[in-house]
Image: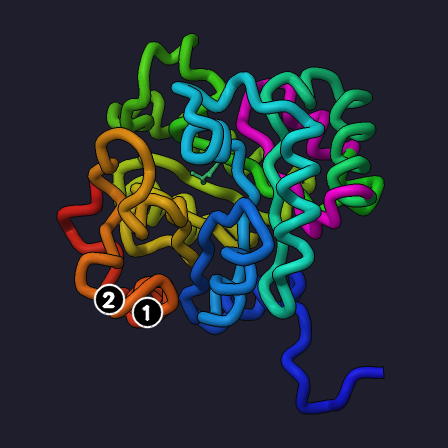
Amino acid sequence: MSAHNEVSKLTLRHIQKMKAECEKFACLTAYDAAFAAAVDRQGVDITLVGDSLGMVVQGLSTTIPVSMDELIYHSKMVARGLSRSMLMVDMPFMSYATPTDALKNAARLMKEGMAEIVKLEWGELQLETVGRLSECGIPVCAHLGLTPQSYFKIGGYRVQGRDQDTAERMRQDAKALVEAGADMLLLECVPKDLAAQITSESGVPVIGIGAGADVDGQILVLYDILDIAPGKRTRFSKNYIAEASGIHGAIKQYVDEVKSMAFPAEEHTF
Ligand code: KIV
């Protein structure tokens, strides 16, 4: 039995409460136990084992080749490093192409990878899938806006929802996903006004990356804030190591700035 004063593991209910009380929550990626322990210790509320691991750990140019086995391998390590932070894990490309595949693979992420919520990228087919996962008691975060697994279909990494038609479609998609059972939404590279509108209309917590300050929580890629990701830094992220005394200081500064809404600033926003 744990002592009463021990910090307990955050659950969906804690994150929902943060939204209800207008308390911003901080999320960050991690890919191994050492970094997971560091983000946990500095107060990161949700840790994501993202398929970004393909680009920042494996040196790939897209997230598409990342496999289920690789995500499970990294997720297992991250789970061992976390005491308080909730563990979210990405479903890789084509692991949820049918509701049956999605159920089987989400169950693997939970049973083998110790995931506490799974994340999948938006597509028309996902409404049925989200419903099936939800019926089976699997928490789901639906990723809208820029969906990197559709890189070749979109033709690049670009801001989504800039014109009225696509913005309206994204609002309707967000609403339908929540009605289908999504427990969280994640908006990537979305104009700030649209992200604010979706956040105020959604009963579930909304995480943003390149989506402005008016979402419920922020997420960045750990290696971007530590300035060790290969390639050019994206406009919406921030180098926190430049002025910090070390890795722990950089992560703490990020968490503090998310909580105080100092991050994201106008320069990180579309
Ligand atoms: O894979 C990832 O790290 C992500 C974040 C960029 C949100 O999906």
Residue 257: name its quadrant.
Answer: bottom left
Q: Quadrant of the C terminus?
A: top left
Q: Nearer the viewer, residue 209 or 38?
A: 38
User: SS at mark 1?
Assistant: helix
Q: Name the residue rendered at 62%, 52% in the picture.
A: 78
Q: Nearer the viewer, residue 246 or 161?
A: 246
For numbered disc 2, what is the local secondary structure? loop
Query: Which residue position is annotated with label 1?
Result: 249
Total marks shown come to 2
Residue at point 41% right, 44% down?
198
Q: Residues within 10 Å of mark 2 (few under 14, many from 20)?
A: some
Report, in whole angstroms, how far the alpha carbon at label 1 lies from the one at label 2.
5 Å
Sequence-wise first label, 1 or 2: 2
Residue range in magenta is 112-132
Q: Is residue 212 magenta?
A: no
Tag of residue 98? none
For label 2, the residue is: 244
The percent position of residue 200, horizontal first and vertical second, equals 41, 53
The residue shown at (80%, 42%) is 112
Horizontal side of 258 relative to 266 (left or right) equals right
Identify whether 96 is placed above or below 261: above
Amino acid type at image mark 2: Ala
Q: Position of residue 262 (x, y in %)?
A: 23, 65
- Answer left or right for 103 relative to 33: right
- Residue type for callout 1: Gly
User: Left of 28 or right of it: where is 97?
Assistant: right
Q: Is residue 4 left or right of residue 176?
A: right
| Image marks 1 and 2: residues in contact by CB distance under 8 Å | yes
Q: Quadrant of residue 24?
A: bottom left
Whether residue 116 appears in magenta in the rendering, the answer is: yes
Q: Position of residue 209 (x, y in %)?
A: 36, 44
